[in-house]
Amino acid sequence: MPHHASRHLAEGPRVGIRHFTYEDGAEFTARARESKDLHHPWLFPPTTTQAYTAYAGRLIEDRAKTGFLVCEKSDGAIGGFININNIVEGGFQSGALGYGAFAHAAGRGLMREGLDLVVRYALGPMRLHRLEINVQPGNAASIALARRCGFRLEGFSPKMLFVDGAWRDHQRWAITTEMITPPSRH
């Protein structure tokens, strides 16, 4: 698959994060189709060009959302994606995270590195104060990632989100600026 050269917003040792583009559609949808078994029943990223265009468009054009691709630095391959939805400014300065690894990258620590980069970018240059991850209790891999990246379990919401044809229970995990940055001494 062709990889498009792009400037990363932030980089770690193995991955960089960058925003979605419409040109990423072919690679993204191919990776999503290859990863269908990994994602089901937790998430359903777009697997067609038309669906990707609509999905990416919302992330690119809606100020209340933004999306990041986790790309391997070695070859530019898209290893996963992390989106911030429901961004609220003002006194709240918060957003809700959603993410998924692609099968070829799963279990290699790339999403951990990518999520750490997105958290630092969101709580830094984006000036958000809080990020929340809502995870179905049976999604052990997603819960483990949230825990490894320093999120704290804040609660349980029954029938919170409509996923895969039904209202599903979710655990709420969150991180705030204070949890990653020592308090300033003024």
Image: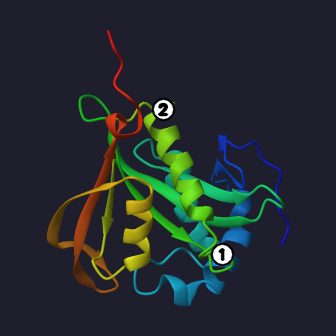
Drawn side of residue 18 relative to residue 186, left or right: right
Query: How many numbered tags mark residues here?
Result: 2
Name above or below for residue 112 compared with residue 28: above
Q: Secondary structure at mark 2?
A: loop
Report if residue 56 is visible in the image: yes
Quadrant (top left/top right/bottom left/bottom right) for the N terminus: bottom right
Q: Amino acid at mark 2?
A: Gly
Residue 54 sits in which quadrant? bottom right
Residue 47 drawn at (x, y percent):
60, 79
Q: Residue at x 47, y 40 (%)?
A: 122
Name the residue beneath numbered marker 2: 124
Is 160 displayed left or right of 76 in the figure?
Answer: left
Q: Residue at x 36, y 35 (%)?
A: 177
Distance from disc 1 to disc 2, alpha carbons, whole Å, reads 30 Å
Amino acid type, residue under disc 1 in the picture: Thr
Packing grade of label 1 (10 A; few <14, some 14-19, many >=20) is some
Residue 153 place in picture, x, y as percent: 24, 59
Is 151 in front, or is 83?
A: 151
Sequence order check, earlier mark of 1 and 2: 1
Image coordinates for residue 100, horizontal then vertical, percent: 52, 69
Q: Which of the labelled discs sits on residue 29, or is there none? A: 1
The answer, for residue 88, to whether it is visible in the render is: no
Q: Is 12 on the left or on the right of 117, as rendered?
A: right
Q: Residue at 16% across / 67% down in the picture?
A: 156
> Going 60% across and 83% down the picture, which residue do you hit?
35
Question: Is residue 105 or residue 34 the one in the foreground?
Answer: 105
- Residue 138 image offset from top left, x and y in percent: 31, 83
Rendered view: 102 above or below 11: below
